[in-house]
Amino acid sequence: MDKIRVGQSQIESAIGIMVEARGLKLESPLTWHEDAENHTFLIQARISGRDCRWRLIREAVENYIGDLNVRHSVDFILQAYFIPH
């Protein structure tokens, strides 16, 4: 479980940086809802007046720290689909 928590923490930090870089404001804490049956996490937040949500595969969250390909892929997805433009 520690790898998941560390991955979540790092993803939260990355989202904070991305939000700030776009001049947006994180209006609510990022929340994680695990769907154990489908091995996914639903992440949700309110960013500059918009409700944002996206599903991440559990394995991607676990491997976010140790695998640069996974990190780049998750960061791209978050920038393209989770964080408002």
Image (cartoon, helix red, strand yellow):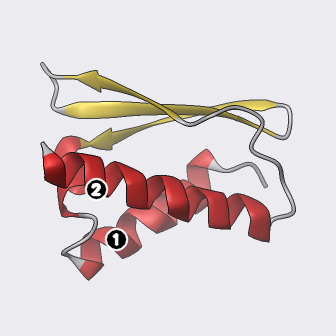
- Total marks placed: 2
- Residue 65, given in percent of the width and then of the height, sits at 26, 70
Name which residue lies at 59% across and 46% down: 82
Name which residue lies at 74% across and 44% down: 26
**Residue lying at the far front of the rendered structure:** 2
Residue 16 occupies quadrant: bottom right
- Residue 12, given in percent of the width and then of the height, sits at 50, 52
- Residue 46, given in percent of the width and then of the height, sits at 71, 32
The amino acid on which the numbered mark 1 sits, given as a three-letter code, is Arg
Name which residue lies at 80% across and 65% down: 22
Q: Nearer the viewer, mark 1 or mark 2?
A: 2
Residue annotated with mark 2:
6
Give the class, few, some or many, for how many residues have Cα within 10 Å of label 1's Cα (few <14, many ≥20).
Answer: many
Q: Is residue 36 above or below residue 64?
A: above
Q: Is residue 36 above or below residue 23?
A: above
> Would residue 62 appear left or right of 21 to someone viewing this image?
left
The label number, if any, that marks residue 71 in the structure image = 1
Give the class, few, some or many, for how many residues have Cα within 10 Å of label 2's Cα (few <14, many ≥20).
Answer: some
**Residue lying at the far bottom of the rendered structure:** 68
> Would residue 30 appear left or right of 52 to someone viewing this image?
left
The amino acid on which the numbered mark 2 sits, given as a three-letter code, is Val
Spatial CA span between label 1 and label 2: 13 Å
Residue 66 occupies quadrant: bottom left
In the picture, the quarter occupied by the N terminus is top left
